Amino acid sequence: GKGLAVFTSGGDSQGMNAAVRACVRMAIYLGCKAYFIREGYQGMVDGGDNIVEANWASVSSIIHRGGTVIGSARCMDFKQRAGRLKAANNLIQRGISNLVVIGGDGSLTGANLFRQEWSSLLDELLKNGQITEEQKTKYAVLHIVGMVGSIDNDFCGTDMTIGTDSALHRIIEAIDAIVSTAYSHQRTFIMEVMGRHCGYLPVVTGIVSEADYVFCPESPPPSDWPDKLCDKLIQERNAGQRLNIIIVAEGAIDRDGKPISAEDIKKVVVDKLQQDTRITVLGHVQRGGNPSAFDRVLGCRMGAEATLALMEATSESVPVVVSLDGNQAVRVPLMECVERTQAVAKAMADKNWELAVKLRGRS
Ligand code: ADP
């Protein structure tokens, strides 16, 4: 059978294990040899014990675990051709020419580059005497398929990324806890949530926690936000509310692009309203803990579909990323999604928030 390897790269997220499990089991079911690559691209470059054959049992009891049990890493070596040459050799020696990459747009871009470069890497390996003519012919094409693991839901082309739903669960558990204590003492709480360039977590959190004010990167407030914020807080208190909740994305900015931090907001509320105000920074709690049912199912669906996509790939087919469209796991062209995601990043950097939001929507 064909050799297939799965790895996780970039930031971790809950549900990656479900995806790894489904991908491995579908591969075994289809008669392939399935491998894990530990520690992302670093393990691919280093080889050795980092690339291990998986069996049915080796992915048991991981679906409920957060993070990624096979490890993830950022890898400078893979950004250099020399690193990718080593990686290619490590794969060929194990008969692997099918890769499932679970990561963000950086990891997917790297995989696509690797695929494009593959035949020239094989030429070099052959010239160096590291692989045989027979191996070069047999593994002439590298097939790749991507899945996006990210709690930020910041990838274009999928309704949800793996991990976002679990992160929302972590956040609302924390806010519910804060709300009960805030109520007792009539306090105002500022909750900092993740989302450097993408407001999905802060906006959805704001809706489901009845927050009074949300600062998110795509909708920067005008410079008089302190007055608007205070008016709103007072209005809510006058309506009988005993507490206020303010959500701030870690990447919140004003219309001039100046960062707005939880401390900035606290200073405004304390100075203008003298409210008893506290900050809670959720940080990595959001990435941790068990994946939600949604993320487990999402990982299962996407992982199985990823393996199927690889097995059906031909030398002519364009690489795909498995994404969620409504309730379906579907295949969409990988580079189109990556390019759109990068266009969003550029639009954000150019302070063209309207364009960023438009590009993020369904095409
Ligand atoms: P994410 O996948 O979450 O966007 P990064 O952008 O840090 O995270 O990418 C993860 C890893 O993918 C990098 O450490 C590097 O090894 C690899 N990678 C990213 N971009 C490229 C690239 N342009 N060329 C080669 N490898 C890349």
Image (spheres, rainbow, N blue to C red):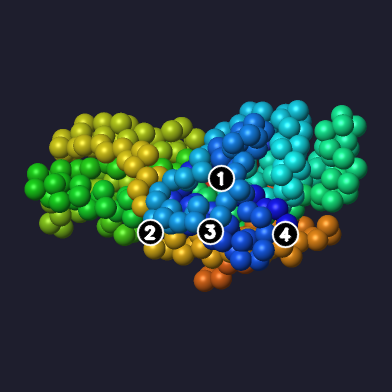
Picture layout, residue 263 above or below residue 202:
above
- Badge 3: few (under 14), some or many (20 or more) residues near its Cα, within 10 Å? some
Mark pair 1, 2: CA separation: 19 Å
Mark 4 belongs to which amino acid? Gly
Q: For disc 1, does the CB lie below 8 Å from ligand 1?
A: no
What residue did someone put label 4 on? 1
Label 4 vs label 2, nearer the camera: 4
Mark 2 belongs to which amino acid? Ser
What residue did someone put label 1 on? 8
What residue did someone put label 3 on? 56
Q: Residue at x 86, y 45 (%)?
A: 136
Closer to us: 235 or 67 = 67
Quadrant location, the C terminus: bottom right
With 67 as the anchor, is 282 left or right in this view?
left
Label 3 vs label 1, nearer the camera: 3
Picture layout, residue 310 above or below residue 243:
below
Label 2 near label 1: C-beta < 8 Å? no
Closer to us: 89 or 268 = 89
Task: Mark 4 or mark 1: name the one nearer the start of the chain.
Answer: 4
